């Protein structure tokens, strides 16, 4: 299992190094080589416009991770802020937050993203907004639950009894304690965002041509599945391998940082 993960990571790192040290344009079209199979000059073949699939995959990887990084930063900030405030102060504010998060959880995240992307129209900025709208909920629920647990611990009570302000307790005690569970949550969320971004691009609501997107490449590859199956196959394997590695990383971090599991061992 680990060997497979290392091989996948090595493949993508190798591709990124080639991208950094070569001036190859992934949008360069060679019409005499449309849909050719993998060969020495084009390792993964070429697409329906004669563009190199390998370089398009690398560009799609970079474009996807740029979007996912921004979405993760926005959604985690909003979710943690709402969750910590809700869990720490409680009361009616907590009830309202619970109601809103439950309402969001009632709808699949991908359907929310599709609905908002369709309303906002396709594009990079609107794609980021559509993915961020529902992604904060998981962070908010986790931050709220952890805050309720942490604020009941003795060291937080001691800080309160010594006159510690709400801001001091939240910044110095609660937020540092959230790093571990939120890192694991973010890892799993990134894997889901990769699929969500690819899905939106697949149906035409994500990145638009000529920008490389795995979802858009998969859509184009499916059209030529009987003629050139390698196109859709390589794109599908790319999405599957990356999601697998990120989920593997999430499982690894979860086991490594799980206090109960480490005690049992």
Image (spheres, rainbow, N blue to C red):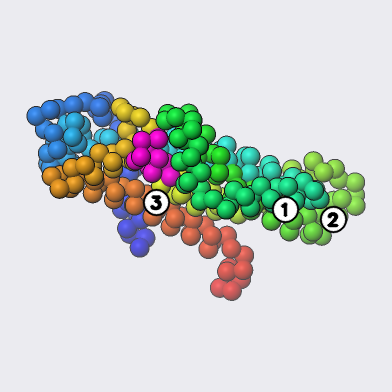
The reply to whether residue 101 is in sight is: yes
Label 1 vs label 2, nearer the camera = 1
User: What residue did someone put label 1 on?
Assistant: 147
Place of residue 10 in the rendered image (x, y in percent of width and height, measured from the top left): 32, 48
Disc on the earlier residue, 1 or 2: 1
Judged from the image, the secondary structure of the residue bearing numbered disc 2 is helix
- For disc 1, the neighbor class at 10 Å (few under 14, some 14 to 19, many from 20) is many
User: Disc 3 versus disc 1: distance between alpha carbons?
Assistant: 30 Å
Disc on the earlier residue, 3 or 1: 1
User: Disc 3 versus disc 2: distance between alpha carbons?
Assistant: 41 Å
Which stretch appears magenta?
A: 196-206
In this view, the residue in front, 258 or 126, is 126
* Contact flag, marks 3 and 2 (Cβ < 8 Å): no
Place of residue 76 in the rendered image (x, y in percent of width and height, measured from the top left): 59, 42
The reply to whether residue 54 is in sight is: no
Q: Is residue 230 magenta?
A: no
- For disc 3, the neighbor class at 10 Å (few under 14, some 14 to 19, many from 20) is some
User: What residue did someone put label 3 on?
Assistant: 243
User: What residue did someone put label 2 on?
Assistant: 157
- For disc 2, the neighbor class at 10 Å (few under 14, some 14 to 19, many from 20) is some
Q: Name the quadrant of the N terminus.
A: bottom left
Q: Which mark is residue 250?
A: none
Label 3 vs label 2, nearer the camera = 3
Judged from the image, the secondary structure of the residue bearing numbered disc 3 is helix
Judged from the image, the secondary structure of the residue bearing numbered disc 1 is helix
In this view, the residue in front, 236 or 146, is 236
């Amino acid at each position: 299992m680990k060997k497979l993960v290392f091989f996948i990571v090595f493949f993508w790192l190798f591709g990124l190094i080639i991208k950094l040290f070569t001036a190859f344009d992934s949008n360069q079209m060679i019409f005499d080589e449309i849909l050719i199979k993998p060969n020495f000059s084009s390792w993964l073949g070429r697409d329906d416009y004669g563009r190199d699939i390998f370089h398009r995959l690398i560009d799609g990887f970079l474009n996807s991770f740029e979007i996912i990084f921004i979405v993760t930063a926005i959604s985690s900030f909003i979710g943690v802020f709402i969750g910590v405030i809700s869990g720490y102060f409680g009361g009616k504010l907590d009830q309202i937050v619970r109601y809103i998060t439950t309402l969001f959880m009632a709808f699949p995240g991908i359907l929310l993203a599709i609905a908002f992307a369709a309303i906002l129209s396709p594009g990079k900025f609107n794609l980021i907004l559509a993915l961020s709208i529902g992604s904060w909920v998981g962070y908010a629920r986790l931050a709220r639950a952890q805050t309720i647990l942490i604020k009941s611990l003795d060291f937080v009570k001691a800080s309160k009894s010594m006159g510690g302000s709400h801001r001091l307790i939240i910044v110095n005690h609660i937020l540092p304690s959230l790093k571990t569970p939120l890192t694991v949550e973010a890892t799993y969320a990134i894997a889901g965002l990769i699929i969500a971004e690819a899905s939106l691009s697949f149906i035409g609501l994500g990145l638009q041509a000529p920008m490389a997107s795995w979802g858009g490449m998969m859509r184009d590859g499916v059209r030529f599945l009987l003629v050139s199956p390698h196109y859709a196959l390589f794109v599908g394997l790319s999405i599957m391998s990356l999601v697998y590695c990120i989920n593997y990383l999430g499982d690894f971090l979860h086991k490594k940082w799980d206090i109960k599991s480490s005690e049992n061992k």
